[in-house]
Amino acid sequence: MKKYIFREFPHVRFPSNDDSLNRLMGRYGGWIQALDPSSEPTTEFLEELESIGYARSEFEAMRFLSSTTEERKSLLIRAAHLRHKILTESGDRLSELQWQAMRPQLQEHDIDDGEIESVISEYVPHLLRWFPPENGNRL
């Protein structure tokens, strides 16, 4: 099985271990196109996604996490992911440096620690479901 790696998010390998999810992504242009935040998913795609057991919020979390845009929601989800890694000690020195570098952007967008903690509880469980650590993914 071919794996793709986003350079902005190097520890998550695509595709997932869910064959039905991989087939769905293949029908809609592949992982990279499906997760591109500049494209809007079709209603048909979202219905098929739900039919195989994934919620739109899970899909949106993955799209924003893989994004490099400076949109507030994208920044918030990326910050929550990074903070979760640090809090669970699965992060390394690089994670700490990335966190420190991100702090000014968070302040600029009025994102505080409470909001980040809320997003951790909302999105991180979905990310762990899509890319479980036992498959070599480091979320």
Image (cartoon, rainbow, N blue to C red):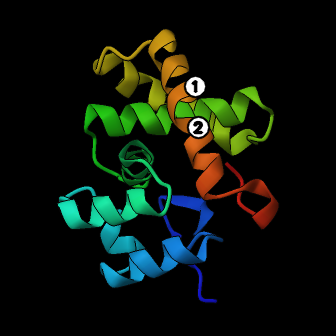
Q: Mark 1 points at which residue?
A: 121
| Corner quadrant of residue 39 | bottom left
Q: Which amino acid does label 2 sit on?
A: Val
Q: Which label was assigned to residue 124?
A: 2
Q: Residues within 10 Å of mark 2 (few under 14, many from 20)?
A: some
Left or right, residue 58 beside residue 19:
left
**Residue 85 vertical placement versus 58 (above, below):** above
Q: Judging from the image, what secondary structure is the residue with disc 2 in?
A: helix
Regarding residue 36, the answer to whether it shows in the image is no
Q: What residue type is labelled 1?
A: Ser
Q: Which of 95 and 67 is in front in this view?
A: 67
> Which residue is painted at 29% across and 21% down in the image?
109
Q: Distance between the residues labelled 1 and 2?
A: 6 Å
* Residue 133 percent coordinates (x, y): 76, 55
Q: Nearer the viewer, residue 23 or 14?
A: 23
* Dot 1 and dot 2 residues touching (CB under 8 Å): yes
| Corner quadrant of residue 18 | bottom right
